[in-house]
Each structure stands twice: as structure tokens, then as C-alpha cells.
Amino acid sequence: MHFSTSGLESARRHVGDEVRVLIEADSDIVLAREHGRLIGKKIGFSATDLTIIATAISEVARNILVFAKSGEIVIREVSEHGRSGIQITARDNGPGIPDISLAMQEGYSTGKGLGMGLPGSRRLMDEFQVISSAGNGTIVEMKKWVNQNG
Ligand SMILES: Nc1ncnc2c1ncn2[C@@H]1O[C@H](COP(=O)(O)OP(=O)(O)OP(=O)(O)O)[C@@H](O)[C@H]1O
Ligand SMILES: [Mg+2]
């Protein structure tokens, strides 16, 4: 399901559901960030963590726009071993990443960026996985757990 700018409220009603944001313009990045904040807040993340989550969403969504032109971000609540968290999946059918370990290095960019988006997001989140190969699109899946110590 693609939520347009009017979709924030419907996302709020679909508690526990996943939210899927089609990424094909700058405004979609903003929308994906907002959904991340809304869902994250509902899960119980701190204000600082909500900013961290929004930042990580921005980076993977920006990569979709720049390198694949279009794709989607799926955001959902997850729970495991009694802890709650948020899962962000960025998916596209773009050119793919031929060498993932190279792409994960700080300062490596095939574009005009600083090459900080992927390594930065990995640092910000608790779990981070890239599935990609040349010609097969890219999936970035990341999770963050609510810090139970506050
Ligand atoms: N969705 C994607 N599809 C294809 N290649 C990608 C994708 N995301 C990242 N990459 C590749 O991985 C490299 C590193 O990504 P990263 O986000 O770390 O840096 P960047 O986007 O080049 O610069 P920055 O994010 O700092 O502006 C990119 O330069 C690009 O080659
Ligand atoms: Mg980037």
C-alpha cells in the first residue's frame, strides 16, 4: 500500500501493521521519515532514538532515489525475546551493489556522496543487513530495539 501525504492518519490506525512508502521523489523521503517517527513513538522509542531512526530511514531512502530511481521502504514493529523494536526494509530493483563490503566502507561512493550513508546507518541501528548483487536490486534491512534501560 502506498500512503500519500494524507496517509499519516491511516498509518496511525493500522497499529501493528506494516507501513509501505513508495520512494520516487524527495517528498517520499520526508513521508518515510514521518512514518518511522510515528511507528517508533508508538513502540516506545525515546526522542533521541526517533531522530536516529529517521536519519537511518533518510539515508536508505536517499540511496534508493539516487542509485535506483525508485523503490520502497517498509516499516514495522517487531518483537523478539520479549523486547520490542522497529524494522526498516528498503527495497529496490535498481542496479544492485556488486561489492557490499566495499560499499559498507566509510568514504566509498560511486556517486557524488561522501560514502557515509550505509556505514553511518549501520552504526545507528542495532542490526543491519544488505542483500544485493549486480543486476539484482538491493534490500537493506535494519532493526533497532527499544533500550530497556531508558
Ligand atoms: N540502493 C542502492 N542501489 C545501488 N547501489 C547502492 C545503493 N545504495 C548504496 N549503493 C552503493 O553503495 C555506495 C555507498 O552508499 P552510501 O550510502 O554509504 O554512500 P553514498 O550514497 O555514495 O554517499 P552518502 O550516502 O554519504 O551521500 C554508493 O555509492 C553506491 O555505489
Ligand atoms: Mg547514501
Image: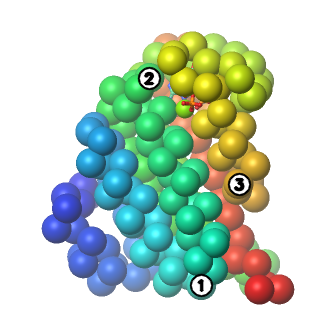
Residue type for callout 2: Phe
Q: Secondary structure at mark 1?
A: loop
Name the residue type under label 1.
Answer: Gly
Instruction: Please give the name of the residue rendered at 58% of the width and 77% of the height, measured from the top-left corner.
Output: 47
Q: Which residue is mark 1?
A: 44
The numbered disc on residue 67 is 2
**Distance of mark 1 from mark 2, alpha carbons?**
33 Å
Does the rendering let one see residue 144? yes
Whether residue 136 sits left or right of residue 129 in the image: it is left
Q: Is residue 148 left or right of residue 5?
A: right
Picture quarter containing residue 83? bottom right
Asked where in the image residue 119 lies, by quadrant, the reply is top right
Sequence order check: which comes first, mark 1 or mark 2?
A: 1
- Please tell me which residue lies in front, 97 or 36: 36
Q: Could you tell me how far apart the alpha carbons at marks 3 and 2 are, in whole angstroms? A: 22 Å
Image quadrant, ligand 1: top right
| Location of residue 97 with respect to 72 vertically, above or below | above
Q: Which disc number belongs to residue 124?
A: 3
Residue 106 placement (x, y as % from top left): 74, 28
Which secondary structure, mark 2?
A: helix
User: Of marks 1 and 3, which one's residue comes earlier in the chain?
Assistant: 1
Q: Which mark is residue 132?
A: none
- Give the secondary structure at mark 3: helix
